[in-house]
């Protein structure tokens, strides 16, 4: 099998006596959506923080595109094409939709922030920002202040900002959170197509979305991966039903 795009090997992290990550090894392969599910406090966000570089593991390593990136900063990983969306929004609410996308494009270009006032006159950056907004279907909202967007539209904008990186992999922390049924459905459709562009490590509570989207699922409980498998395998795994699915 081809090398995974992204992999963790034995990632471990303790907060005092609490083992938040316990030797987590998992792989994200080209073209796939790999969902990570588990109860609140299982360590999903902690795992993502280590993968993306905002939290240093106590042990273990992260490999991205065949390279050990464990010692690299979040920015260095992002520059390699590792794109992250946050559980809580990291958008600039007073700026317009287009400005937020431009900010992403500017960051992706590696140019310093002081260039931002000029970014809106930079054709290449504008193209990149507009293409990302187009891809997520909110190009027509580009003049709105971000605060005026619905929750679902903000989620789409977050994905657009990530897209400006032209990512090689996405890591998403509960993108469906707070979306209504309609919004979840739309985002599910969008993520479904997105995996062809870059594989997605998807932390998500919305099990309808997970079952609809995931090529594989890993179940995290108390910092440990207790099972990895296809949707069908995970749904019939007695350990998983007991620990998480609860029926
Ligand atoms: P999840 O995203 O699966 O809900 P988290 O990764 O946020 O879980 O948290 C896993 C566990 O680690 C929880 O018990 C949480 O309280 C704890 N935790 C997370 N971050 C910290 C931190 N910075 N300091 C101490 N404990 C933390
Ligand atoms: Mg979390």
Image: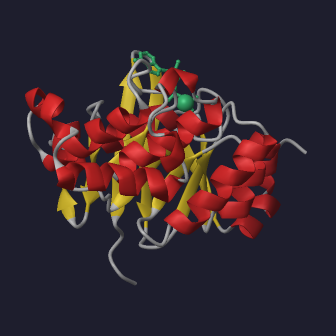
Residue 53 in view here = yes
> In the drawing, does residue 116 fall left or right of residue 90?
left
Residue 173 in view here = no
Between 27 and 101, the one nearer to me in the picture: 101
Q: Where is residue 215 in the image (x, y as percent from the top left)?
A: 61, 68
**Residue shown at 27%/36% (left/top)?**
103
**Residue shown at 26%/57% (left/top)?**
63
Which color scheme is applied? secondary structure
Q: Position of residue 78 (x, y in %)?
A: 24, 47
Give the answer, above or below, for where 224 lies relative to 90: below
Between 164 and 230, the one nearer to me in the picture: 164
Give the answer, above or below, for where 74 lies relative to 164: above
Q: Position of residue 161 (x, y in %)?
A: 38, 43
Between 126 and 2, the one nearer to me in the picture: 126
Quadrant of picture, ligand 2: top right
Q: In which quarter of the image is residue 93?
A: top left
**Residue shown at 41%/26% (left/top)?**
90
Which image quarter is the C terminus in? Answer: top right
Give the answer, above or below, for where 7 lies relative to 224: below
Q: Residue furthest toward the right?
A: 247
Between 213 and 192, the one nearer to me in the picture: 192
**Residue shown at 9%/41% (left/top)?**
111
Q: Quadrant of residue 101?
A: top left
Q: How many marks?
A: 0
> In the drawing, does residue 196 fall left or right of residue 227?
left
> In the drawing, does residue 110 fall left or right of residue 146?
left
Which image quarter is the N terminus in? Answer: bottom left
């Amino acid at each position: 099998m081809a090398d995974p795009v992204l992999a963790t090997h034995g990632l471990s992290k303790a907060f005092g006596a609490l083992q938040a990550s316990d030797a987590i090894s998992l792989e994200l392969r080209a073209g796939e959506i790999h969902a990570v599910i588990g109860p609140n406090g299982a360590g999903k966000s902690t795992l993502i923080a280590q993968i993306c570089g905002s939290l240093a593991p106590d042990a273990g390593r992260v490999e991205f595109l065949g390279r050990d990136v464990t010692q690299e900063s979040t920015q260095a990983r992002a520059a390699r094409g590792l794109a992250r969306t946050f559980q809580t929004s990291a958008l600039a609410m007073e700026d317009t939709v287009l400005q937020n996308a431009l900010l992403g494009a500017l960051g992706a270009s590696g140019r310093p922030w002081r260039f931002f006032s000029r970014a809106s006159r930079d054709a290449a950056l504008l193209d990149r920002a507009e293409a990302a907004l187009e891809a997520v279907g909110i190009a027509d909202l580009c003049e709105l202040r971000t605060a005026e967007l619905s929750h679902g539209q903000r989620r789409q904008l977050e994905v657009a900002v990530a897209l400006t990186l032209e990512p090689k992999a996405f890591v998403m922390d509960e993108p469906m959170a707070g979306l209504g049924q309609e919004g979840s459905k739309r985002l599910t459709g969008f993520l479904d197509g997105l995996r062809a562009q870059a594989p997605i490590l998807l932390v998500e509570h919305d099990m309808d979305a997970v079952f609809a989207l995931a090529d594989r699922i890993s179940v995290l409980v108390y910092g440990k991966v207790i099972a990895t498998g296809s949707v069908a395998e995970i749904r019939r795994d007695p350990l998983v039903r007991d620990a998480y699915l609860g029926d």
